[in-house]
């Protein structure tokens, strides 16, 4: 029963894909040091539940019972029609900060006519937006030219392009453990071999000595990190950790991809933000920075960007002809309007206030309803990484679907099934909804 239950959870979570061939009974029995009778009974139970199909001479493969939705391997948003009955703690994204979204789109429409007379394809991004993003980096003390910027379709589009340029099929990519589930899955789909590097305890950032050893021994082509309010833990790496990691990546010949999508979401007033990771790479040969409007502003604004050396940007732009050609013009104009009018800062201030209030109310509700659960309260970002008092995160996720609260389990954020005793809770709900979510989880 335990073996059947474990395989069923792996399928429901998407960690073993549907239609994956399972080992023969004798092979699995040897691997698990159990009797073949045990494996045969587990397979028979799975067949009876609809989670396994078999054919004589062809073996057995995973399935889902008729009427069940196919499990996703990432953190896909809940369909809008389910929002009324299910509290969605799967997607770490807040509603748009109005009236800034509407004003930005109106401003973009006013700027659109000259662009409507062109073909509309700008593989590197609109020149005005590239210049504006470069100017913002320069204002942060990182001198940047527009030639160092490529506008992408969200941060996911940016990292996908980087992985295809540097990390071909079979290449090693070092990742934090845990890390952002959708990026891990993107890299798996690209055929990468993921090398996990454990985070330091609590909210202290990276274990740089461990990073240095992995970079030296595994020699990964790429390393992917979230230094600013890490997803899912909320950790913030300090200046010294950033400097040392950039040095280690440079020594190993590894391209360090720094995800800055959470960098503006500091929630406590007294947080002193470290310098950007790229500040410790003045030659620009080691660090590639990824930014986005999706977390700080709105997930529906699919605008991201890459900051890198001009030759890297040229290579990324050239490869784009075989991908998505370019990013929608109207959304680029909307983000440029926000940057150029001061609307961005005002909107992000609204976003911080909303996330801070949600965080505090969710933390209070979880502490009241689930006193055995352990976590440290991050000082920014959008996520709470929770140790579930010895319970299985996968079982909690499955049970949550039945009681109307959707929560992603810890193993989605790990490599090879790590973090079974964790769940991630985002700051997307507050007040009575946060209280009800904690009650349902309890």
Image: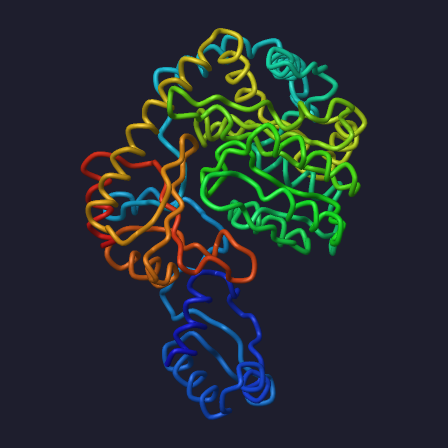
Q: Describe the colour scheme in one phrase.
A: rainbow
316 relative position to 236: left or right = right
Can residue 115 be seen at all in this image of the molecule? no
Is residue 298 placed above or below 418 in the rendered structure?
Answer: above
Instruction: Name the residue nearer the viewer: 414 or 367.
Output: 367
Can residue 215 be seen at all in this image of the molecule? yes
Is residue 270 placed above or below 6 in the rendered structure?
Answer: above
Instruction: Name the residue nearer the viewer: 106 or 304.
Output: 304
Is residue 358 placed above or below 39 in the rendered structure?
Answer: above
Identified at 48% across, 23% down, the residue is 264
Report the quarter where the C terminus lies.
bottom left
Identified at 47% across, 55% down, the residue is 72
Across and down, in percent, residue 412 comes to 48, 54
Is residue 351 placed above or below 197 in the rendered structure?
Answer: above
Q: Splitting the image into 4 quarters, where does residue 310 fall? A: top right
Across and down, in percent, residue 48 comes to 37, 82
Identified at 79% across, 41% down, the residue is 253
Image mark count: 0
Across and down, in percent, residue 23 comes to 58, 80
Q: Splitting the image into 4 quarters, where does residue 278 fall? A: top right
315 relative position to 398: left or right = right
Report the quarter where the N terminus lies.
bottom left
């Amino acid at each position: 029963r335990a073996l059947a239950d474990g395989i069923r959870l792996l399928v429901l979570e998407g960690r073993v894909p549907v239609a994956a061939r399972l080992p023969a009974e004798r092979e699995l029995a040897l691997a698990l040091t159990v009797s073949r009778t045990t494996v045969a009974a587990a397979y028979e139970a799975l067949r009876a539940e609809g989670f396994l199909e078999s054919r004589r001479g062809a073996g057995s493969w995973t399935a889902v019972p008729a009427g069940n939705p196919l499990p996703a391997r990432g953190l896909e948003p809940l369909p809008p029609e389910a929002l009324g009955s299910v509290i969605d703690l799967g997607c770490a994204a807040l509603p748009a900060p109005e009236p800034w979204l509407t004003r930005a789109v109106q401003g973009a429409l006013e700027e659109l006519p000259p662009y409507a007379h062109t073909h509309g394809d700008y593989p590197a991004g609109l020149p005005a937006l590239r210049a504006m993003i470069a100017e913002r980096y320069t204002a942060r003390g990182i001198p940047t030219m527009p030639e160092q910027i490529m506008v992408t379709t969200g941060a996911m589009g940016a990292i996908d392009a980087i992985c295809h340029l540097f990390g071909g099929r079979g290449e090693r990519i070092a990742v934090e453990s845990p890390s952002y589930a959708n990026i891990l899955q993107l890299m798996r789909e690209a055929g990468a071999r993921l090398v996990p590097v454990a985070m330091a305890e609590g909210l202290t950032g990276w274990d740089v000595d461990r990073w240095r050893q992995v970079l030296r021994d595994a020699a990964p082509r790429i390393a992917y990190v979230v230094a600013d309010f890490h997803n899912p833990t909320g950790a913030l790496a300090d200046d010294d950790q950033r400097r040392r990691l950039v040095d280690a990546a440079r020594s190993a010949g590894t391209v360090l991809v720094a995800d800055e999508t959470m960098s503006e979401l500091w929630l406590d007033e007294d947080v002193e933000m470290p310098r950007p990771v790229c500040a410790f790479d003045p030659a620009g040969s080691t660090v590639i920075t990824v930014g986005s409007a999706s977390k700080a502003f709105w997930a529906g604004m699919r605008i991201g960007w890459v900051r890198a050396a001009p030759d890297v940007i040229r290579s990324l732009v050239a490869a784009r002809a075989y991908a998505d050609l370019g990013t929608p013009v109207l959304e680029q104009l909307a983000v440029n309007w926000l940057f150029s009018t001061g609307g961005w800062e005002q909107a992000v201030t609204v976003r911080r206030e909303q996330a801070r209030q949600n965080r505090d109310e969710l933390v209070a509700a979880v502490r009241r309803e689930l006193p055995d659960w352990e976590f440290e309260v991050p000082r920014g970002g959008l996520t709470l990484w929770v140790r579930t008092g010895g319970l299985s995160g996968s079982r909690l996720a499955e049970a949550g679907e039945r009681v109307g609260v959707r929560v992603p389990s810890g193993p989605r954020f790990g490599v090879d099934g790590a973090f079974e005793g964790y769940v991630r809770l985002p700051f997307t709900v507050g007040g009575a909804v946060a209280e009800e979510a904690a009650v349902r989880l309890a």
